[in-house]
Image (cartoon, grey):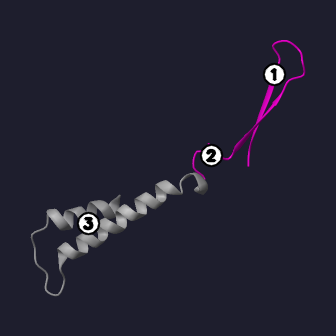
Amino acid sequence: MLLIAAGAILVWAVDATVSGVNLVTVGWILLVIGIVGGLLSMIFWSSWAGPGYFSRRRTVVDDGAPRRRVVEEEAV
């Protein structure tokens, strides 16, 4: 998010000139890198220790007794 914010500021808010550096181009580069990084982070969130929704197993043991049930969860 920091790269996206810095890139957006350089593209749309800064009206300065620096010799040898095009600040608008630098801003667009930072903006694109920030967006790509954010998308990759969201795509790989569950495999990098996210909430663990897809990697849990649920074992239910029912011994036949009425109203008694044991549920065990383990992370894979």
Which residue is located at x 57 percent, y 51 percent?
46
Question: From mark 3 to mark 1, how far is it between C-alphas?
Answer: 55 Å
Q: Which residue is mark 2?
A: 52
Disc 1 packing (10 Å; few <14; some 14–19; many ≥20):
few
Between 53 and 15, the residue placed more toward the observer is 53
Q: Which residue is mark 3?
A: 7
The amino acid at mark 2 is Gly
Question: From mark 3 to mark 2, how far is it between C-alphas?
Answer: 33 Å
When the figure is inspected, residue 67 is found, relative to residue 23, above or below; the finding is above
Which residue is located at x 17 percent, y 87 percent?
20
Give the quarter of the image for residue 32.
Answer: bottom left
When the figure is inspected, residue 52 is found, relative to residue 62, above or below; the finding is below
Where disc 2 sits, the SS reads loop
Comes first in the chain, label 3 or label 2: 3
The amino acid at mark 3 is Gly
In the picture provided, is 50 more to the left or to the right than 59?
A: left
Q: Is residue 22 magenta?
A: no
Where disc 3 sits, the SS reads helix
Q: Which residue is mark 1?
A: 69
Residue 13: percent from left, percent from top: 14, 62
The range drawn in magenta is 49-76
